Each structure stands twice: as structure tokens, then as C-alpha cells.
Image (cartoon, grey):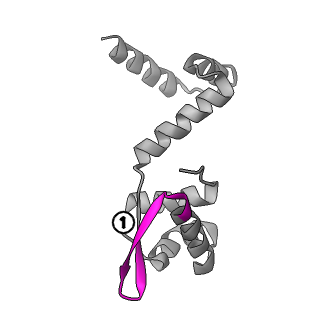
Amino acid sequence: MSRISEAEHHVMEVLWEQHPLTAQEVADRAGEARDWNIRTVKTLLSRLLAKGAIGHEEDGRRYLYRPLIARGDYVAGESRRLVDRLFGGKVTPLVAHLAAQDALTAEDIAEIEALLRELKQ
């Protein structure tokens, strides 16, 4: 599957939350925050169809859209690409970078520590 843009990702989030949806239903949900009209949403849906990220089925004179990739699979792929591209495939430099930038809250650190304890067991 081709990479998806930020706008396309917003449409995917709508479809991951609920599906199947018509283009108008996607526009109603996605367009509120973005000030998108139905034509913009239909363009984004067409792009996602071409990339194989979503599928559709006919329902009378309209199409119902649904994701073809799970959100978890998408997040895993994007996360791996980020770590590979920016940190040579290693997670430790990512965490070190976040710590150096004061981007980790005390809650983040506690969650990371809990995760590490869990992974060690």
C-alpha cells in the first residue's frame, strides 16, 4: 500500500471508528474539524481506494466505504518506518531524543518503566 497523506489519514480515522459509511457520512464526520466539503472528501476517498487502503460496495445509487487495513497494522508500519528512517531502526535513540527534548512527562516515564518491567517478565 502507498503511503497516505495527513488528510487521507483523517478520513481513515473516521472509517476506523465506524464503517461502512457513505461519502456524505464521512464528510459529515471528517469535514467538521477540517471545513471540508463533500467534493474534497470524495477526492480523498478516491485516492484511498486507488491506494488499496479502503474498499467500497454499492448500496443503490451510493457507495459504502470501509477500511481494508486495520488501524493497528497501519500504526505498526508507520512506527517502524519512522524508527527505521530517523533512528537507524533502533528504539533507544528515539526515547533518548524525546528525553533530551523534555518531551516525556512523568506519566510517560512511569508508563515506559511499567512496560519494561512487563517485558522483562
Element type where label 1 sits in the image: loop
Is 98 placed above or below 24 here? above
Residue 64, relative to residue 55: is it above or below? below
Residue in the image at 43% along x and 24% along y = 111
Q: Residue 116 at x, y = what percent? A: 41, 16
Looking at the image, residue 55 sits to the left or right of residue 47; the answer is: left
Please determine whether, in this image, residue 50 is positioned above or below residue 92. Answer: below
Part of the protein shown in magenta: 50-65
Q: Quadrant of residue 18?
A: bottom left
Q: Position of residue 53 (x, y in %)?
A: 49, 57
Residue extending farthest to the left is: 121
Question: Residue drawn at (39%, 21%), measured in percent from left and top?
Answer: 115
Which quadrant is the C terminus positioned in?
Answer: top left
The dominant secondary structure in magenta is strand
Residue 63 belongs to the span the image colors magenta? yes
**Is 117 left or right of 5, judged from the image as shown?**
left
Quadrant of residue 40 in the image? bottom right
Tell me where residue 107 appears, x and y as whole percent: 48, 27
Kind of residue sitting beneath label 1:
His
What residue is drawn where x is 54% and y is 35%? 79
Which image quadrant for residue 61? bottom left
Q: What residue is shown with label 1?
A: 19
Seen as rendered, the residue at the extreme top is 120
